[in-house]
Image: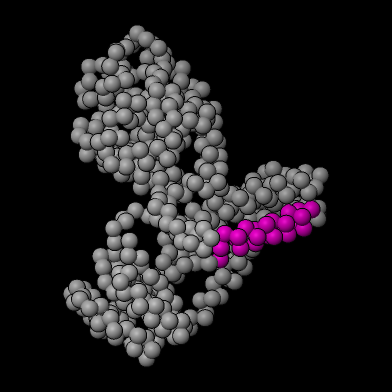
Amino acid sequence: MMPKNNFKLIALITFLVDILLLMLSFFIGMYIRFGSDFPNEIMYFYMFAAGCILVWLIIALKFNLFDFPRILYVDKVLTKNATSVAIFIFLSAALLYFSTEYKFSRIFFISTMYFYTVFILLWRMLIVFSLKKLRKKGYDIKKIVFVGSGGQLNTLISSVYLNPSHGYQITGIFEDANPSKKLEKYYKGTLDKAIDYCEHHNVDEMIISLPHNQADLINKLLKCADNQMIRARVITEFSEYLYQRFSIDYIENIPVMKIRKEPLQSFSNRILKRAFDVVSSVLIILVLFTWLFPLIALLIKLTSKGPIFFTQKRTGKEGETFKCLKFRSMKINGKSDTVQATKNDERITPVGSFLRRTNLDEFPQVFNVLFNQMSLVGPRPHMLRHTEQYRVLVDKYMVRHFAKPGITGWAQIKGFRGETKKVQDMANRAKADIWYIENWRFLLDIKIIFITIWRMFFKKDSNAF
């Protein structure tokens, strides 16, 4: 079995390969721009190469890119690295612009950064899959004991610690109640046996799940863990009844629990999401809207009376009202602000039916995105009447307004779209929206956009009408 210390070299290996990939990207960029006749300018080799290596090292250390937790999720690793690469590109460009008057080739810079982004993400995927595979084969194993019981602990053991790719070996479970059949083989005795076991066996980690009235035993277990060089973790008692994500902040050394984790509360995450929204909406307008808008506008005008656009007041972020833009898909009627569209709705025009099925009626909302009223991805904005109605009927409904509304969203790709015939339909949609808010990642937005586009062209949605 490979010694555990060998795995500590992963950080060093990761750094060295990162530098090699940066230099490889550098030479690819040079070749694309200059061919085999590389310039002799020392600015390229010293200012750019050395400067970028230094910038990447600082960013990588700041964001802990060389640290790989035992419980690895590919999407989280890629999101963190993609965000870091975006910051790296911005800082590298700023460094070149403000530190020298020498004009670097834009083709060279863009090519270098493009290939480095691809290489880094592929390299990180390789590391994650390799670590999982090695641990699954029995390398770098951590021996762990569990003290206590509870639904949360049993779920954790089943979903995480019994997964061989995380590299854990359960050496003991201690609880006063009888364990489940699945965990029976790991049972070593009652709670009072845990300390003696840890003192006489090789244990790397201890997880404690006990109620507050067992405070004396918890303190004894923590003392034992410290004396035996065992890393200890405690599952808090309130995790049994708080099923949403929460975090602990410290104010004057007093722990304060934050009930909901919101990644988009982070300034850097908001900047990343907003930059993506602006760039994408501008590209959509320039590449598609310039020719598609006149075509759709002409079809709307030729087939029904009324304006090209339909505007409606809807609820946005923090409950603020904004005017949501759409291509008009219905005949002019007085029920647009009160009655949802239904299947075979007589108000929908033939062209409107096509626009709604393909989601092209939502296309003008790229302007809402550009004006910072919406995002490409987020909870769908509802008309004001529905906000007032469902805030009373659906628990936590208003939480979905903590985020900017989107043209598409997690709820939509999960099938919670279209008419809400029952209160439960809206409850399911709100639940999916809240999940998105609490689990936002940049790659999650990319995933939602790609699934939305694929379904527009290749999959008919029965709820799209």
| 447 relative to 54, above or below | above
Q: Quadrant of the N terminus?
A: bottom left
Residue sitting nearer the eye, 290 or 138:
138
Q: Which residue shows up at 20% across the image and 31% down it?
A: 421
Query: What's drawn in magenta, residue-wise?
Result: 43-66
Specify whether 53 is left or right of 219. Answer: right
> Going by the image, does 19 lie left or right of 336?
right
Q: Say which of 99 and 176 sits in front.
A: 176
Considering the image in quadrants, where does the C terminus appear?
top left
Residue 97 can be seen in this image: yes
Residue 410 place in picture, x, y as percent: 36, 42
In the picture, residue 376 is in which quadrant?
top left
Find out whether residue 150 is within the magenta segment: no
Q: Position of residue 214 (x, y in %)?
A: 31, 74
**Is the magenta region chiefly helix, strand or loop?**
helix
**Relative vertical location of residue 319 with respect to residue 211 in this rendering, above or below:** above
Give the camera-side residue of 465 and 133: 465
Instruction: Give coordinates of residue 372: x percent, y percent.
Output: 51, 32
The answer to which image quadrant residue 72 occupies is bottom left
Residue 399 spot, x, y in % from top left: 37, 41
Nearest the viewer among 420 and 53 is 420
